[in-house]
Image: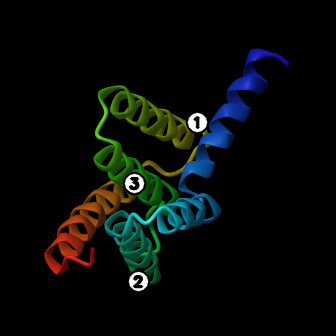
Amino acid sequence: MNFKNWKKEIFRDLLALGGIPFFLLVIARSFVGGYSTFTYQIVLSLFLISFVGLFFGKFNQHVSRALVLIVFTILFYNQTIYNFFAAFVGILLLFSLIYSKIDKKEIFFGVFLGSIISFISYYLVNLINFA
């Protein structure tokens, strides 16, 4: 396999991080593991991203969901090595979206909404204190 095909395959695979099946897999794992606060934060984030997507469809939901997963897993694990790794994967995801010729405005708004929704979900779940 040559470098161009390898790069294309890696960038394509990075998009799975923001995919619904991967998101649901993380929810299922956290639910089975008994991490209720983490589970509620992820579920609420997915609901909010989907809800906002109904009204403002011009944002990249993959990057929003990926950012939510990156933020909450960083908060969950709270380990320096993992934090750097997750941030690095997030940066690679952004490069893969640009490489895939996704509209930069959609990427920007996806990052923006993912950040806002992560913030809202984190504080709302902790305020209600489901755990």
Residue, far top: 2
In the image, 90 versus 123, the foreground residue is 123
Quadrant including the N terminus: top right
Residue underneath mark 1: 99
Q: Residue 130: percent from the left, percent from the top? A: 26, 78
The disc placed on residue 17 is: none
Depicted 53 relative to depicted 115: above or below: below
| Spot occupied by residue 82 in the image (x, y as percentages of width and height) | 39, 32
Which numbered mark, 3 or 2, is in the foreground of this view? 2
Q: Residue at x 74, y 16 (%)?
A: 3
Sequence-first tag of 1 and 2: 2
The answer to whether residue 116 is above or below residue 49 is: above
Residue 6 at x, y = what percent? 74, 24
| Disc 3 secondary structure class | helix
Way the structure is coloured: rainbow
Q: Residue at x 58, y 36 (%)?
A: 99
Label 3 belongs to which residue?
A: 105
Of pointers 3 and 1, the one earlier in the residue sequence = 1
- Neighbor class of circle 2 (other Cα within 10 Å; few <14, some 14-19, many 20+) is few
As helix, strand or loop, the secondary structure at mark 2 comes to: helix
Q: Quadrant of residue 5?
A: top right
Name the kind of residue labelled 3 in the image.
Lys
Residue at the spot 49% in from the left edge and 51% down from the top edge: 103
Of helix, strand and loop, which one carries label 1?
A: helix
Residue holding disc 2: 55
Measured in 3D between alpha carbons, the distance from the residue under mark 3 to the one under mark 2, in whole angstroms, is 16 Å
In the image, what residue type sits under mark 1?
Tyr
- Binning the other alpha carbons within 10 Å of mark 3 as few (below 14), some (14 to 19) or many (20 upward) gives few
- For marks 1 and 2, give the CA distance: 27 Å
